[in-house]
Image: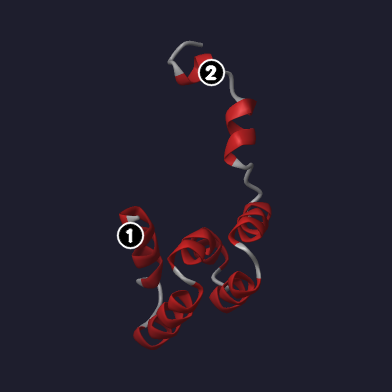
Amino acid sequence: MAYKRLTIGRILWRFGDAERAAVRAGMATVGLAKASIVTPAIERFGEWRAWLDTASQLSAVLLQAQVSAALEALPLAVASRARPAKVFAGRS
């Protein structure tokens, strides 16, 4: 759970004082789990209001899918199947 707070803290420092307070309040409204899901999208696109609004409307599962699609990221299970296990073991 600490890594989620660190990730959110890192993104908050990108904003000025007044806007940081608004972002923090918005993240508190959606909760730690959803805030940590949208943090990479906010970091990349900067559209914190839109992402927090989306977070308030979707379940965590649907939100993660939407963030992954926006970031063009593969879900973890698909990404791990895309690479042979021997690569992770240090063999090529």
**Circle 1 residue:** 6
- Pick whichever of labels 2 and 1 is earlier in the sequence: 1
The location of residue 33, given as percent across then percent down, is 47, 62
Residue at left offset 44%, top offset 16%: 89
Instruction: Name the disc covering residue 85, or none.
Output: 2
Residue at the extreme front = 59
Q: In terms of depth relative to the viewer, which is nearer, 1 or 86?
A: 1
The quadrant of the picture occupied by the N terminus is: bottom left
Query: What is the count of numbered marks?
Result: 2
Residue 32, placed above or below residue 21: above
Left or right of 49 in this view: 7 = left
Residue type at mark 1 is: Leu
**Quick one: SS at disc 1?**
helix
Q: Residues within 10 Å of mark 1 (few under 14, many from 20)?
A: few
**Quick one: SS at disc 2?**
helix
Q: In terms of depth relative to the viewer, which is nearer, 42 or 6?
A: 6
Residue at left offset 34%, top offset 66%: 9
Instruction: Name the disc covering residue 61, or none.
Output: none
Q: Residues within 10 Å of mark 2 (few under 14, many from 20)?
A: few
Residue at left offset 54%, top offset 74%: 48
Q: In terms of depth relative to the viewer, which is nearer, 54 or 9?
A: 54
Residue at left offset 53%, top offset 18%: 85
Left or right of 39 in this view: 60 = right
Mark pair 2, 1: CA separation: 30 Å
Left or right of 43 in this view: 4 = left
Q: In terms of depth relative to the viewer, which is nearer, 70 or 57?
A: 57
Residue at the extreme bottom = 18
The location of residue 13, given as percent across then percent down, is 35, 71
Residue 44, placed above or below residue 19: above
Residue type at mark 2 is: Ala
